[in-house]
Amino acid sequence: MNNTFEKVCILGLGLIGGSIGLAIKRSNISNQITGYARSNSTLERAIELGLVDSVKDNLKDAVNNSDLVILATPLSTFRELVEDMSPFLKKGCIITDTGSAKLTVIEDLKDILPNGVEFVPGHPIAGTEESGPDAGFAELFDNRWCILTPTEDNSSNAVDLVKDFWESIGSKVEIMDPMHHDKVLAITSHIPHLIAFNIVGTANNLANVTEKEVVKYSAGGFRDFTRIAASDPKMWSDIFTYNSDAVLEMLDLFSNDLAKLKAAVIKKDSDLLFSNFEKTREVRKNIIDAGQEESDVDFGRKKSEE
């Protein structure tokens, strides 16, 4: 891909949006990168850090003449942003996003897209617990999956262009049905985060465990949970709201399995516990063998999948 998108506009200049800007610059695949955010301090910092070439504090100027507009804001902002910018989008512009839920977003946007503009849903499986413009780094998407969930309304050309874009900034791209995406992410990302938020809250609420003890005696597993639970609360509250159906379905399955483990603990059934742990250990080994394992610290940043 060689400057297929002459002008790229990134809405949202936090970890994901800022990293996209830096990755585009590194790969030299666009001649103009414009950033938009609602906070003047974010816009100023984005310029200081070189995340984008220019910033705008209004949508009209930001998206004007853009070939690609990337929604890198919380899911709950997508519809309002698309409604507000639609009159100013040129024919042939493509909109894509970085959200972790797809079905609800597709439904939200399908009736407000202007003629001649396509929305190609996307989700880079990359992130850290950090947020804000200072968290961005160009290598965030290197060798990480980006899932595209096109609909029947998408042209093959638009999908190919977005696919090429993500590959050009380092990602591996998978095409997936939106419903399947939401279920896969519910079990691989959303439920683990929900558990993390809950277990940290439970530890904090225990009357006989002070904050000092939680910190002092935390083993590696609990520290990992604490790291995940430090993720952006707005982003994650939106994810659980927008992917509630899939999360609840997967949560029911998880709860049933957890109930079986609880029963085994009550019965002191060491054979059943051992069998279960042995099976899950093998699954973990397969994940590592498949090349999905990454260091806790990569490119100088702690990483976690969204």
Image: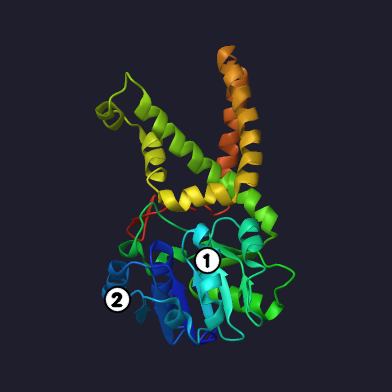
Give the foreground label among 2 and 1: 1
Residue type indicated by callout 1:
Glu
Mark 1 crowdedness (10 Å alpha carbons): few <14, some 14-19, many ≥20: few
Label 1 residue SS? helix
Percent x, y for residue 222? 39, 34
Mark 2 crowdedness (10 Å alpha carbons): few <14, some 14-19, many ≥20: some
Residue type indicated by callout 2:
Ile
Percent x, y for residue 84? 51, 73
Specify whether 102 is left or right of 39.
right
Q: Which of 288 and 93 is in front in this view?
A: 93
In the picture shown, does residue 286 fall above or below 147? Answer: above
Specify whether 298 is left or right of 179.
left
Q: How far apart, in angstroms, are the residues tagged by discs 2 and 1?
A: 25 Å
Label 2 residue SS? helix
In the picture shown, does residue 15 fall above or below 34? Answer: above
**Residue that badge 2 annotates:** 47
The colour style of the image is: rainbow
Identify the residue shown where x is 30% and y is 63%: 134
Q: Which of marks 2 and 1 is nearer the N terminus?
A: 2
In the picture shown, does residue 182 fall above or below 175? Answer: above
- Quadrant where the N terminus sits is bottom right
In the picture shown, does residue 141 fall above or below 157? Answer: above
**Residue that badge 1 annotates:** 80
